[in-house]
Amino acid sequence: MAEATEEKKADSDSKRVHTYPLIRHSDMNDEMKTEAMELCVTACEKFASNNENAAKMIKDTMDKKFGASWHAVVGEGYGFEITHEVKNLLYMFFGGNIAIILWKCS
């Protein structure tokens, strides 16, 4: 019985690693949210070791698809406070510790 308790404690102390995209907040419509999420996953997988290039790819693609003035931040361990257009915000996690914020502001 004591071994089972120790195993549960060890499991709960370890960090949870999410290998799937986890949308934390979004006010986009479902179609745009799905496209943006897939784009973010693709960019993070393509540029796994370079967050700056991933953010640039996301921004450029969203600018072409949905009009200008998109902004993207890809990284870990950052905070933010932004002003954005309504229905144009996505905040998500991918790969456990990578956070992506994507918003439109004109």
Image: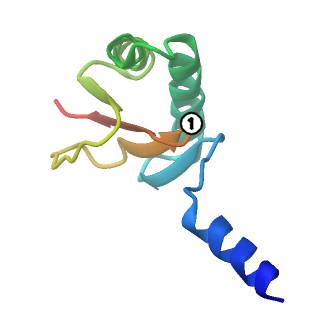
Q: Residue extending furthest front?
A: 2
The one of 73 and 70 positioned closer to us in this rendering: 73
- Residue 50: x and y in percent read 40, 13
Where is 19 relative to 63, above or below?
below
Label 1 neighbour load within 10 Å: few <14, some 14-19, many 20+ = some
Direction right: furthest residue? 1
Q: Nearer the viewer, residue 92 or 89?
A: 92
104 vs 19, left or right, is: left
Residue at left 21%, top 47%? 79
Horizontal placement of 55 versus 31: left or right?
left
Residue 40 appears at what percent x and percent y? 51, 27
SS of the residue under disc 1: loop
Please report the residue visible at 59 percent of the width from the left and 55 percent of the height from the top. Answer: 16
Where residue 54 sits, quadrant-wise, is top left
What amino acid is labelled 1 in the image? Gly
Quadrant of the frame with the C terminus: top left
How many badges with numbers are in the image? Answer: 1
Does 86 sit left or right of 19 as displayed? left
User: Which residue is tagged 1?
Assistant: 95
User: Whole-percent x and y of residue 1?
Assistant: 84, 89
Q: Quadrant of the rendered structure where residue 52 is?
A: top left
Tell me what residue is drawn at x 27 percent, y 18 percent.
Answer: 68
In the foreground, 67 or 23 = 23
What x and y, as percent, mark residue 17?
A: 60, 48
| On screen, residue 61 above or below 87 | above
Residue under the point 40% across and 46% down: 91
Color encoding of the figure: rainbow
